[in-house]
Image (spheres, rainbow, N blue to C red):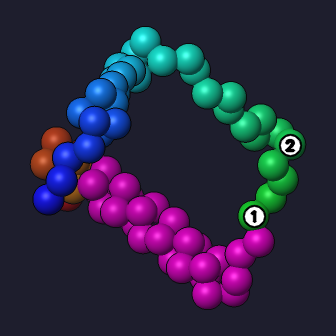
Amino acid sequence: MNITEATINQNFSVVHPLFDKPEKKLNPESVGQMKMTKSVRYSLMVLRLYLICMIVVAFYRTFVIAGILH
């Protein structure tokens, strides 16, 4: 393996992300809505229903332990 003089004299600089120039961010208002398939929409509705049910169960269990519900 030959190491050429150009390879030896090559300098690399490392820029820490805190000192780098900030990148331009996208404006969320100009992006628009995402297209969802029926399966994605159904999955998200099921997930929302599951989370609501788990919150209701947690409150119910809290009320039972507190003695508010028998």
Label 1 is placed on what type of residue?
Met
| Magenta region includes residue 53 | yes
Q: Position of residue 2 (x, y in %)?
A: 18, 53
From what the image shows, is residue 22 above or below residue 59?
above
Relative depth, front residue between 65 and 54: 54
| 34 left or right, relative to 60 | right
* Residue beneath the point at 69% across and 86% down: 38
As helix, strand or loop, the secondary structure at mark 1 comes to loop
Look at the picture and state if 30 lies above or below 1. above
- Horizontal side of 54 relative to 25 (left or right) equals left
> For residue 57, which numbered disc appears in the image?
none
Category of crowding for the residue at label 2, using alpha-carbon neighbours closer than 10 angstroms: few (below 14), some (14–19), many (at least 20): few
Most frequent secondary structure within the magenta stretch: helix
Query: Which residue lies under the disc numbered 2?
Result: 30
* In the depicted structure, whether residue 25 falls above or below residue 13: below
Q: Residue 34, image x and y in percent?
A: 75, 64
Residue type (three-letter) at the residue carrying disc 2? Ser
Q: Is residue 49 visible?
A: no
Q: Position of residue 19 (x, y in %)?
A: 43, 12
- Callout 2: SS: helix
Instruction: Name the image quarter holding the C terminus.
Output: bottom left
**From this viewpoint, is residue 15 visible?**
yes
Residue visible at 33% across and 30% down?
10
Judging by the rendered image, the residue that carries numbered circle 1 is 34
The residue range painted magenta reads 35-60
Q: Give the side of residue 39 with respect to residue 4, left or right.
A: right
In which image quadrant can residue 45 be found? bottom right
Query: Which image quadrant for residue 13?
Result: top left
Please check the rendered image and state whether residue 2 is part of the magenta-colored stretch, yes or no. no
Question: Marks 2 and 1, how far apart in space?
Answer: 12 Å
